Amino acid sequence: MAIMKTRAVLLKAPGQLELTERELTVGANEVLVKTEYASICGTDKNIFVGQVAEDHYTMAMHGKGNPLYSNREVPAMPFWIGHEGGGTVEAVGSKVHEYQPGDKVISFSWAGTYADYFVAPVNGLQKVPEGMDMRLACLGEPIGCAMYSVMTSGVNLGDTAVVMGSGFAGLIMVQGLKKRGAYKVIAIDKSDDKLMMAKEMGADVVYNVDKDNVINGVIEETNGKGADLVMEAAGTEQSVNTSSAVLKHNGKLVLYSYITQPIKLNIGRWHDDSFDIRTTCLVHHTENERQVWAPWALRPVAKGQVNVEPLITHTFGLNDIEKAFETVCNNPDAVKVMLKP
Ligand SMILES: [Zn+2]
């Protein structure tokens, strides 16, 4: 296919973004998509500030040549940033039979979605589920990951569950845990705004880590037993350690965050109290498996059983990409920042 040009955001070096022209070609197994919306997640923020690059440095030290490491793409700079988003298929490569122009799709790969158009490998996309609002569908990747995590967390009717971090994923988890029968959900964050949202979305108790004693609070709320389940969705050393400290004997520790820096953990209880530890994320499946799991994880949102709309706190045009990242990095009340090309 002929070369086409689009506006796209290039991360030239940590902290240095440029909205510039990008040339796109569509390979035999690739799909050209006209972006409707894209969005920024914690991983994009980590790449923006240069933390993921360092993670790969660490990986090179400990995992170079180690076949057990997942082959996650290294965001080498300059980098066409953006993996969340969706839109309408504009053209398909000669070997693509899964999609045709006009189809609505969700991005699940590092396609450079902060652009008017992006090209994705055919297996880096998902079809938008029937009946799903397109603005929400463009958030399909982060919604799918958080929903999948709840749906595979092992939460049971009657459980007291703690959600560490009331960001986009955490606020979806709060709702999902209640829907799956949790007796009590305790939401944790640093932002009172986010904790207020957590309450509106069904959290029974909320704690601000900067003001409250979270460990004592959870112990009190569970009559000295500890939480049945903790979902870690804040991605900090403090958050993982608090997760380990508030869980009951034999409790479920569900690790969701993608932590890109080495952190110091106190894991004595992992041994003494025999936790059931699971790492849950939709995108860790192979691409073929994801084709099966993503529609399942998105179905409750398409049906309106989980409310995502209030979690979109900011929307910017591509011209304001710097403002968008400044909001993600510095506004503790921002939940999901979207981009509208
Ligand atoms: Zn993401």
Image (cartoon, rainbow, N blue to C red):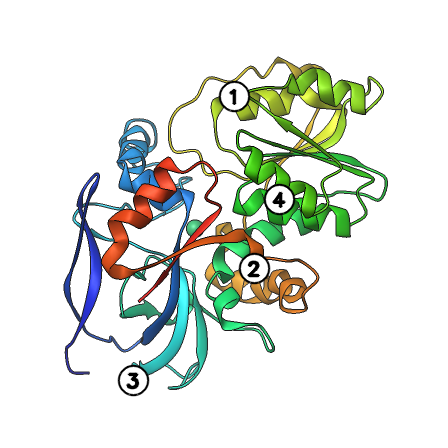
Mark 1 is surrounded, within 10 Å at the Cα level, by few (under 14), some (14 to 19) or many (20 or more) other residues, namely some
Dot 1 and dot 3 residues touching (CB under 8 Å): no
Q: Residue at x 41, y 86 (%)?
A: 102
**In 3D space, how far apart are the residues under numbered discs 2 and 3 (Cα atoms)?**
37 Å
The amino acid pointed to by label 3 is Ser
Q: Which disc, if any, is residue 17?
A: none
Q: Secondary structure at mark 2?
A: helix
Residue 196 in picture, x, y percent from top left? 63, 39
Q: Quadrant of the N terminus?
A: bottom left
Give the image quarter of residue 199. Answer: top right
Q: Residue at x 26, y 36 (%)?
A: 50
Q: Secondary structure at mark 1?
A: helix
Q: Residue at x 37, y 86 (%)?
A: 101
- Determine whether 259 is above or below 284 in the image: above
Precedes in sequence: disc 1 or disc 4: 4
- Determine whether 105 is above or below 239 in the image: below
The amino acid pointed to by label 2 is Glu
Precedes in sequence: disc 2 or disc 4: 4
Residue tagged 1: 238
Mark 4 is surrounded, within 10 Å at the Cα level, by few (under 14), some (14 to 19) or many (20 or more) other residues, namely some
Q: Which of the pair 284/265 is nearer the observer?
A: 265
Is the CB of mark 2 within 8 Å of ligand 1?
no
Left or right: 101 in relation to 5: right
Residue tagged 2: 309
Residue 318 in picture, x, y percent from top left? 27, 60
**In 3D space, how far apart are the residues under numbered discs 1 and 3 (Cα atoms)?**
50 Å
Mark 3 is surrounded, within 10 Å at the Cα level, by few (under 14), some (14 to 19) or many (20 or more) other residues, namely few
Precedes in sequence: disc 1 or disc 3: 3
The amino acid pointed to by label 1 is Gln
Residue tagged 3: 94
Residue tagged 4: 197
